[in-house]
Image: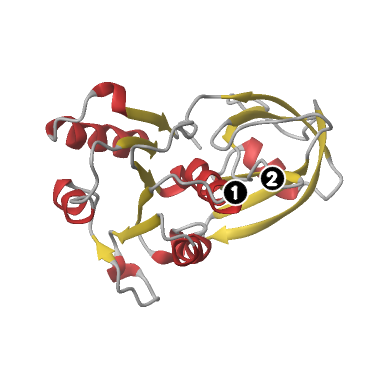
């Protein structure tokens, strides 16, 4: 499907959001991804001219959006310099890291860094449709400056009593912003503090491969069955 760039903006240090026109007839579920293709880019490298991105937009939005760390690759350099109206191509949607249809069990999101994108889309969708899902989102970053959509997520938590945000920072000594929330890495003790009332939850994990693996180990040690752990690794984002 063909699309065009609407615009882009910085949403955290080193992280940008890109918004695209939604092709006619394109539908997806919050949490799904697309493949994005550059068209005749002025430069390329061994990683190629396409990337997979989870959609950070809600299906209700009149556009599509992705959010990505701006690594120094040919793809990211070209993407950053595209002007509004530039043509691109997308394929998809893909993936099954989506909300369950039933809302009888609590949901726990564990996000590291840019892994927030599927959960941000889901949280917005749940809020806009006033769905009954009970969600606790753990969101780990080095500093508040690195945390994409932190302000928006804090707003959603205030507006939706069924949505709880637990943000934690691991390197506040390098931050210029005040922080009164959790500090340190996601661990079993942090989960226990905030999930003592959660009965039989379903866990969703998204972020860098190391974070996803460590979180899975914590959950397995807690006795969480494998079928109740759903994951997505953001490798080379």
Relative vertical location of residue 228 with respect to residue 197 in this rendering, above or below: above
- Residue 147 in the figure: left or right of residue 204: right
Camera-side residue of 114 and 194:
194
Image location (x, y in percent) of residue 28: 65, 31
Whichever of labels 1 and 2 marks the residue nearer the N terminus, that label is 2
Residue at 27% in and 32% down: 213
Q: Quadrant of residue 227?
A: top left
Relative vertical location of residue 24 with respect to residue 16 in this rendering, above or below: above
Q: Quadrant of residue 161?
A: bottom left
Q: Nearer the viewer, mark 1 or mark 2?
A: 1
- Marks 1 and 2 sit apart, C-alpha to C-alpha, by 9 Å
Residue at 14% in and 30% down: 223
Residue at 63% in and 45% down: 58
- Quadrant of the frame with the N terminus: top right
State the residue position of label 2: 60
Camera-side residue of 112 and 107:
107
- Residue 32 in the figure: left or right of residue 133: right
> Do the CB atoms of the residues marked 1 and 2 lie less than 8 Å apart?
yes
- Residue 47 in the figure: left or right of residue 228: right
Relative vertical location of residue 180 with respect to residue 57 in this rendering, above or below: below
Image location (x, y in percent) of residue 170: 28, 59
Residue at 47% in and 30% down: 97
Total marks placed: 2
- Residue 23 in the figure: left or right of residue 66: right
State the residue position of label 1: 129
Q: Does dot 1 land on a helix, a strand or a loop? A: helix
Camera-side residue of 138 and 68:
138
Image location (x, y in percent) of residue 56: 59, 44
């Amino acid at each position: 499907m063909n699309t065009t760039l609407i615009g882009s903006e910085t949403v955290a240090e080193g992280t940008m959001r890109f918004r695209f026109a939604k092709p006619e007839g394109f539908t997806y579920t919050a949490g799904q991804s697309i493949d994005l293709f550059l068209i005749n880019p002025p430069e390329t490298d061994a990683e190629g001219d396409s990337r997979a991105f989870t959609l950070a937009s809600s299906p209700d939005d009149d556009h599509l959006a992705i959010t990505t760390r701006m690594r120094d690759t040919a793809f990211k350099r070209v993407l950053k310099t595209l002007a509004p109206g530039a043509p691109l191509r997308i394929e998809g949607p893909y993936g099954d890291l989506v909300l369950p249809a039933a809302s009888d069990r609590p949901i726990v999101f564990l996000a590291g860094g840019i892994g927030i994108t599927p959960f941000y889309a889901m949280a917005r969708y749940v809020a806009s449709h006033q769905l009954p899902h009970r969600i606790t989102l753990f969101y780990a970053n080095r500093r508040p400056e690195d945390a994409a959509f932190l302000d928006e997520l804090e707003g959603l938590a205030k507006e939706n009593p069924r949505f709880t945000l637990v943000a934690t920072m691991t390197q506040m000594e390098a931050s210029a912003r005040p922080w009164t929330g959790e500090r340190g890495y996601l661990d079993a003790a942090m989960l226990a503090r905030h999930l003592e009332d959660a009965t039989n939850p379903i866990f969703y994990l998204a972020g860098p491969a190391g974070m996803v693996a460590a979180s899975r180990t914590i959950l397995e040690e807690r006795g969480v069955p494998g079928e109740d752990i759903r994951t997505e690794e953001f490798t080379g984002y």
